[in-house]
Amino acid sequence: MTHHVAAHSTHSTASLRTASIYPHSFRLLHWLLMASLLVLILTGPSLHTIARPEWSLTHGVLPGWLWGGRVLMIHLIAAAVFAPSIVAAAWVYFRRRRRKRLPYKWNHLLLLGGGLVMLLTGLLLQRLQWQPTLYTTARAVHALGWLLMTGSLLWHIVMALVRWLRLLVPAFHPWADWQWKPVALFIPLAVVTTWLSFSGNLLPVGRTLVATRIAAGDNAIDDLAALPWQQAPQLVVYLANGVGLHSGCTRAGVQALHDGREIYFRVEWDDPRENRHFWPWKKTAEGWEALVTNPRDEIIWYEDKFGLCFPVQRWRQFELIGCAVVCHAGGGWAYGYKHSPVVIDDWFWKAVRTDPVGQVDDKYWYRLDRENKDG
């Protein structure tokens, strides 16, 4: 009798221990999803606040209690981890539930569904700048996916702490029953999703501006329009998240010529209205009135502008993610500030302040001096 009880007790303990240890793929994805999703949820509102004014609830100014700094770069890195993880998690979840005939839980479906929506719309946001309506729709759905994921994750955490606390450690245990097969299958999936997300940056073809050489006698400085622009190939760049334009989107065509000593650029873009106002004054019965709607970030009585920025030396990080590596959110400025370990040259054309005299500002970005706000 005693032996029978001992054997029964041993069998029950072993079964309980086996049931509390999740598959290695589940635990691996739990870590990756939790870490990347928390970063995405925290950086998402920061990106919203520094968006164009008609979209941002804070008119482009980041509140001090939100995540500042290189939030765009951090968001992109977290997205690169999240993308393969959510795809793998959905595959593992539905495969296991179907094979074992387990019921689907609504919170799991919301988490996985919201994650897949964020992944799909995130990819579309990088490729739909040419179509303002589709771009705006994808952005709105992306925001809804963020709300869905945030609410579902909070509920998931509450339920884990209240009802499934004893399973919390087994669900994240990193070393128990380690298996290389899930890792080996996850790596190519991560390569594919990263390629889909950043292929435009990884492939220089189609995003390289070629400057055509011309004879020194062709550079009629007094009439730049007379230069042989027909010889220069045009690089088409689709821009988004701007002020005005077509829902913040436009298409810019860039050309370049050089004679071995001087270089010339020609830029054309679609704009429904030409803006040649910069805080103008209006004569009234009471005197002169400054036409300003927002002293911190004027967008109504303001000029058209165009800028080219590039590092003075080759910088691989800038080649991969562009301004995201130097653009920082916060600092008290609308749309953030610039801070870079490498000097960034900035050529800045302004319709009112530089164009009438045929000039372009030559500025630079470098390390930010927070005390003097000069960087």
Image (cartoon, rainbow, N blue to C red):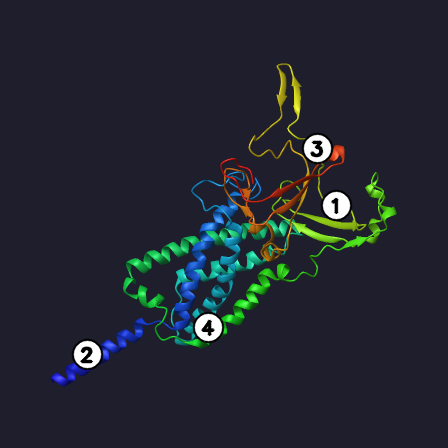
Spot occupied by residue 57 in the image (x, y as percentages of width and height): 51, 40
Tag 4–tag 2 contact (CB < 8 Å): no
Spot occupied by residue 125 in the image (x, y as percentages of width and height): 59, 54
Between 201 and 131, the residue placed more toward the observer is 201
Q: For residue 154, which quarter of the picture?
A: bottom left
Task: Identify the residue at horizontal 64%, vertical 28% (top origin).
Answer: 279
Nearer the N terminus, badge 4 or badge 2? 2
Q: For residue 101, which quarter of the picture?
A: bottom left
The tag on residue 183 is 4
Q: Given the current orientation, which residue lies at the most extreme right position?
A: 217
The tag on residue 352 is 3
Q: Amino acid at mark 1?
A: Glu
Cα distance, mark 2 to mark 1?
Answer: 79 Å
Mark 1 nearby-residue class (10 Å; few <14, some 14–19, many ≥20): few
Between 325 and 261, the residue placed more toward the observer is 261
The tag on residue 296 is none
Task: Identify the residue at horizontal 82%, vertical 41% (top origin).
Answer: 221
Which is closer to the viewer, label 3 or label 1? 3
Residue at the spot of label 1: 268
Nearer the N terminus, badge 1 or badge 4? 4
